[in-house]
């Protein structure tokens, strides 16, 4: 049963029972209606208490029904809310743990609300490109006040119930209790059972001392902060309707806004990303109930920028870390880097002194592999060279106990080869963190041919513990993210050959929505890193064509921000990229040597070539089974490569264009004599999907 019904004394208790967060799916909505009608028909019942089983009152919409007809089937949530509000007997919401989205709208339809301290409250629909569609924009301003409600609705942020209870004049919560909320709600129901008329949030005024000036100021602020997202401004206008219109008219305005947002590409993209993030944790061939290995201590080999950042993830999660280096100076720099990072958080008020002390107490530096003997997980983060990796993994294998997990942070190298350096390939996998490792959400979990089910399951669970978005990848050169970005970078190089400047390419990419264009990104990461990869590829895959402009750049020592000169010039101590006359001259010389006459290239062509390069390589990864699903590729690019969130990731964006149109564009690009015609041969999967009238995410 998705909602349980029992009578306790003279009160009917309705308990939402749809784990894990009592999502308000169709069956749950039907059960609520049946329970309310049952309570109405029982003369012995004088009040109703509504609560949630387990660890939530309700988290809102049932994500299993996202995008399906069930989501809006009657009784839909607005109908359930109206029924509860119209109940002739007082309905008391016993709110605890989590009360979000439709769950909060349901609570607002009750006549009274008793809430447990510490309950997390939010209307997060804006993060899906929507607005609350069951009266939240109309009732919350009446219950909490216009300004506080607007902040909650436009931000979608989670707030503790006791903080909301401190808002002057609020009528959102009638009581905040520290103990058992159901018992407190039953006692409260007994107190109010005979009171009439029943208080309804809809009957409260939604007023502001100077609404016209307030909403205009708010419009300016919201417009500036949500340039590519239509939902925040729609939320604001719905709240304004609560102030300016009668309740029923305000509800109609809310529903019109909700319907309009549902069909926007931005909302579709955000909803896709929401579902994709949850899907990424599901591994098709991983048996249910696969046992996990216990991770109580972590070792990180390599105290450079990446190794230090990786270590901080585990310190933040309360796990002891041994940081190992071969040189005392390098180890001290790594330890100092970690201390400095935490102290910077302390100075900004993002970390308290006791937390800083606790994290540093878990950290130990070492110059000896003997100190990793008891580690349950060892992560290698040394130089990206197979010979170096071999030396490190042979030492790890000799030092650590049986059953320890051995991971490489390699961004491109073969995990199967690395596993072969050990006597325990079943314990080896890739954990590819992204820089800065303590900040970036993405973690590519690279599954080797011999990686054990329990090792993979443990890595996925650990990723969740350290708050990473984990995506499983198979073994290939570059895995998912870097294999695709190589094609993006190749196109960027060909564009330079044909007449673009680095700043034009970057401007076009950033106008599309990328956090950073390809040349600014390479300057940040270090042009020498990609140069080393190209040198390796020249030996391993000599047929792969590149523009030689990047090699010419590196031959002049222009490695990026670290040398104050890359594709751009940088002033000492500054990160602002300045167009470089030296690079312009270098490119002119390069084109002349190739006998190329530069041409005018539109920004639309730049974006098309960069993005469709990602799409075609992504389709090949799916065909080869390197990525499990198209949405996993989207998650890699949304959480690790700065792809614009409102476009949903490269594969989602291709779906939005229509795969037939994508196919035609690739055929057209293949006719460019300066480009790589072989690359633009559409991936077999793409051709098959077009023939079948399907999409990547269908």
Image: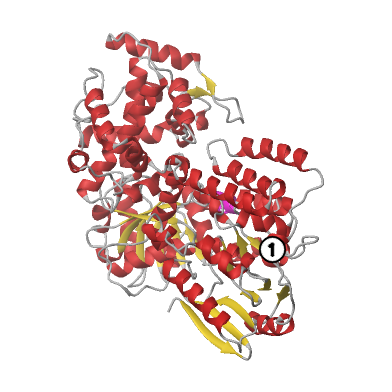
Q: Residue at x 54, y 53 (%)?
A: 125
Residue 42 picture location, percent across and down:
57, 86
Q: Is residue 642 visible?
A: no
Q: Nearer the viewer, residue 414 or 445?
A: 445
Residue 234 picture location, percent across and down:
58, 43
How are the residues colored?
Answer: secondary structure
Mark 1 residue element: helix
Q: Nearer the viewer, residue 472 or 557?
A: 472
Does 397 appear in magenta? no
Q: Nearer the viewer, residue 570 or 665?
A: 665
Number of other residues with Cα within 10 Å of mark 1, as a class: few under 14, some 14 to 19, many 20 or more: many
* Extreme residue toward the bottom, this view: 9
Q: Quadrant of residue 81?
A: bottom right
Q: Residue at x 61, y 79 (%)?
A: 49
Q: Which residue is mark 1?
A: 201
Q: Nearer the viewer, residue 428 or 80?
A: 80
* Count of numbered badges drawn on the protein: 1
**Magenta-colored span:** 332-341
Residue 105 picture location, percent across and down:
59, 62
Image position of 558 with respect to 632: above or below: above
Q: Is residue 672 visible?
A: yes
Does 339 appear in magenta? yes
User: Magenta region's main secondary structure?
Assistant: helix
Q: Quadrant of residue 592?
A: top left
> Left or right: where does residue 686 sit relative to residue 191?
left
Residue 196 picture location, percent across and down:
74, 75
Image position of 349 with respect to 645: above or below: below
> Left or right: where does residue 388 sit relative to residue 312?
left
Q: Residue at x 27, y 71 (%)?
A: 287
> Left or right: where does residue 16 sit relative to residue 591?
right
Viewport quadrant of the N terminus: bottom left
């Amino acid at each position: 049963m998705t909602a349980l019904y029992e009578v306790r004394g003279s009160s009917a208790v309705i308990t939402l029972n749809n784990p894990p967060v009592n999502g308000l799916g169709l069956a749950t909505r039907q059960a609520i209606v049946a329970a309310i009608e049952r309570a109405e028909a029982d003369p012995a019942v004088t009040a109703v208490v509504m609560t949630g089983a387990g660890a939530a009152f309700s988290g809102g919409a049932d994500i299993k029904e996202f995008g399906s007809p069930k989501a809006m089937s009657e009784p839909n949530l607005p109908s359930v809310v109206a029924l509860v509000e119209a109940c002739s007997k007082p309905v008391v919401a016993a709110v605890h743990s989590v009360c979000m989205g439709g769950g909060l709208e349901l609570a607002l339809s009750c006549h009274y609300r008793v809430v447990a301290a510490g309950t997390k409250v939010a209307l997060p629909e804006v993060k899906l490109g929507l607005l609350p569609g069951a009266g939240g924009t109309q009732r919350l301003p009446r219950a909490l006040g216009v300004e506080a409600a607007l902040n909650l609705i436009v931000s979608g942020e989670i707030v503790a119930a006791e903080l909301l209870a401190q808002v002057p004049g609020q009528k959102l919560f009638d009581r905040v209790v520290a103990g058992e909320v159901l018992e407190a709600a039953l006692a409260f129901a007994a107190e109010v059972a005979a009171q009439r008329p029943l208080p309804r949030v809809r009957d409260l005024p939604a007023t502001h001392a100077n609404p016209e000036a307030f909403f205009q100021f708010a419009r300016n602020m919201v417009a500036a902060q949500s340039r590519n997202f239509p939902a925040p401004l729609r939320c604001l206008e719905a709240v304004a309707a609560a102030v300016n219109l009668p309740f029923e008219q305000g509800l109609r305005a809310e529903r019109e806004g909700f319907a309009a947002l549902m069909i926007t590409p931005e909302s579709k993209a955000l909803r896709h990303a929401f579902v994709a993030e949850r899907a990424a944790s599901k591994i098709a061939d991983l048996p249910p109930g696969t046992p996990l290995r216990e991770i109580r201590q972590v070792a990180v080999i390599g105290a450079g920028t990446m190794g230090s950042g990786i270590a901080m993830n585990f310190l933040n999660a309360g796990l002891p870390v041994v940081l190992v280096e071969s040189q005392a100076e390098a180890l001290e720099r790594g330890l100092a880097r970690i201390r400095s990072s935490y102290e910077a958080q302390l100075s900004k008020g993002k970390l308290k002194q006791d937390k800083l002390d606790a994290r540093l107490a878990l950290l130990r530096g070492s110059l000896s592999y003997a100190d990793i003997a008891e580690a349950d997980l060892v992560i290698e983060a040394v130089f990206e060279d197979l010979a170096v990796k071999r030396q490190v993994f042979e030492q790890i294998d000799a030092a650590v106990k049986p059953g320890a997990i051995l991971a490489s942070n390699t961004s491109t190298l073969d995990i199967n080869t690395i596993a072969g350096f050990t006597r325990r390939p079943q314990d080896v996998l890739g954990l590819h963190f992204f820089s800065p490792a303590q900040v970036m959400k993405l973690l590519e979990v690279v599954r080797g041919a011999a990686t054990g089910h329990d090792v993979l399951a443990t890595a996925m669970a650990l990723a969740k513990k350290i708050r990473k978005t984990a995506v499983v990848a198979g073994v290939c050169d570059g895995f998912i993210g870097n294999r695709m970005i190589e094609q993006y970078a190749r196109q960027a190089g060909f564009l330079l050959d044909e007449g673009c400047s680095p700043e034009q390419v970057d401007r076009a990419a950033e106008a599309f929505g990328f956090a950073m264009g390809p040349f600014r990104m390479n300057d940040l990461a270090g042009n020498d890193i990609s140069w080393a990869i190209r040198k390796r590829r020249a030996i391993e895959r000599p047929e792969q064509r590149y523009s030689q402009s990047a090699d010419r750049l590196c031959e002049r020592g222009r490695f990026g921000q670290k040398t104050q000169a890359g594709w751009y010039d940088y002033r000492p101590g500054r990160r602002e990229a300045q167009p470089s006359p030296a690079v312009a001259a270098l490119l002119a010389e390069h084109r002349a040597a190739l006998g190329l006459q530069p041409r005018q290239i539109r920004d639309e062509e730049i974006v098309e070539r960069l993005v469709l390069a990602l799409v075609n390589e992504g389709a090949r990864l799916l065909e080869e089974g390197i990525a499990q699903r198209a949405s996993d590729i989207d998650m890699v690019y949304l959480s690790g490569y700065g792809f614009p969130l409102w476009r949903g990731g490269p594969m989602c964006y291709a779906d939005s264009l229509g795969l037939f149109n994508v196919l035609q564009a690739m055929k057209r690009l293949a006719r460019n004599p300066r480009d790589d015609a072989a690359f633009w041969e559409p991936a077999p999967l793409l051709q098959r999907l077009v023939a079948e009238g399907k999409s990547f995410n269908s």
